[in-house]
Amino acid sequence: MVSMNKESKNGSVRHYFEYSESGVEVISDGLVEVPFGEYLVETGKLSRDQLFAAMMFQDQNPGVRIGECVAALGYVPYTVVDQAFTQYNSL
């Protein structure tokens, strides 16, 4: 087993997490807010195709929120959309 002193370990870990100069482009650091429609897909309440259809419906009905579109199209019941939105807002 190879033994490394504490300073050497910290240096190798620090180097591992540094940005590479080999062409890896970092667009942004940190967390990015996920749109509610994506949240519905990620939680399995909606398929990607359903989200796309709901977004097209939303495009034809300006001012209507994506959750309302999803429910109006019958993909997810209003009560489930409301529960998901409450969970989404608590994140």
Image (cartoon, helix red, strand yellow):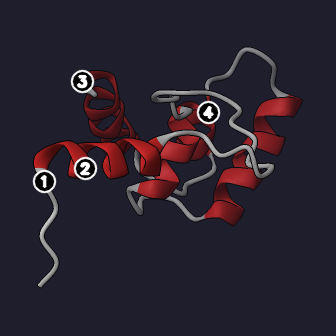
Tell me the SS state at disc 1: loop
Q: Earlier in the sequence, mark 3 or mark 4?
A: 4
Q: Which residue is mark 3?
A: 90
Identified at 12% across, 47% down, the residue is: 6
Mark-to-mark CA distance, 3 and 2? 41 Å
CB atoms of marks 2 and 1 within 8 Å: yes
Give x and y (percent) for residue 86: 27, 27
CB atoms of marks 3 and 4 within 8 Å: no
Q: Is residue 11 above or below residue 9?
A: above
If the image is split into quadrants, where does the C terminus sit?
top left
Q: Earlier in the sequence, mark 1 or mark 4?
A: 1
Mark-to-mark CA distance, 2 and 4? 51 Å
In the rendered structure, the answer to whether residue 63 lies left or right of residue 16 reads right
Identified at 81% across, 19% down, the residue is: 62
Hey, which residue is sitting farthest bottom in the picture?
Answer: 1
If the image is split into quadrants, where does the N terminus sit?
bottom left
Q: Which residue is mark 2?
A: 8
Hey, which residue is sitting farthest top in the picture?
Answer: 63
CB atoms of marks 1 and 4 within 8 Å: no
Q: Which residue is mark 1?
A: 5
Mark-to-mark CA distance, 2 and 1? 5 Å
In the rendered structure, the answer to whether residue 78 lies left or right of residue 41 reads left
Tell me the SS state at disc 4: helix
Q: Give, as a three-letter code, the residue at label 4.
A: Ile
Q: Which residue is mark 4?
A: 66
Report which quarter residue 68 is drawn in: top right
Give x and y (percent) for residue 75: 54, 57
Q: Give, as a three-letter code, the residue at label 3.
A: Ser
